[in-house]
Amino acid sequence: MPGSARTMAVCTVCGLVLATAYTVTFGGNGLIWFLWVVLALVTVGVVTARRV
C-alpha cells in the first residue's frame, strides 16, 4: 500500500477511535458518524484506486 493510502487508512482508524470515544463520553452524534462514514468511503476509494 503506497504512502498516501496508508496515511488515509491510519486517519480513518484514528477517526473511528475518536468518534467512538466521543460517543461513549458525550452520547451519540449522527453528524460525527456520517463524517466518519464519508472518510471511510474515501479511504476505500483511494486504496482501490492505488491497487488498480
Image (spheres, rainbow, N blue to C red):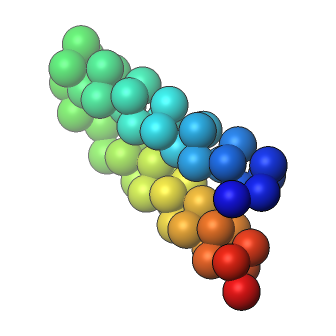
Which residue occupies the foreground of this view, 12 or 48? Answer: 48
Residue at the extreme bottom: 52
Q: Is residue 51 left or right of residue 32?
A: right
Residue 1, visible in the rendered structure: yes
Residue 25 to residue 16: above or below: above
Residue 20 point in image, percent of width and height: 29, 29
Q: Quadrant of the C terminus?
A: bottom right
Q: Quadrant of the N terminus?
A: bottom right
Q: Residue at x 58, y 48 (%)?
A: 9
Q: Is residue 7 left or right of residue 13?
A: right
Residue 16 to residue 35: above or below: above
Q: Residue at x 31, y 20 (%)?
A: 21
Q: Within the image, what quadrant is residue 51 found in? A: bottom right
Residue 3 point in image, percent of width and height: 79, 49
Q: Is residue 10 left or right of residue 30?
A: right
Residue at the extreme front: 1
Residue 6 point in image, percent of width and height: 67, 48
Q: Residue at x 50, y 57 (%)?
A: 40
Which residue occupies the foreground of this view, 6 or 38? Answer: 6
In this rendering, the count of numbered labels is 0
Residue 31, visible in the rendered structure: no
Residue 43 point in image, percent of width and height: 60, 60
Q: Residue at x 56, y 54 (%)?
A: 39
Q: Within the image, what quadrant is residue 2 found in? A: bottom right
Residue at the extreme right: 3
Q: Within the image, what quadrant is residue 29 found in? A: top left
Q: Is residue 2 left or right of residue 30?
A: right
Residue 27 to residue 11: above or below: above
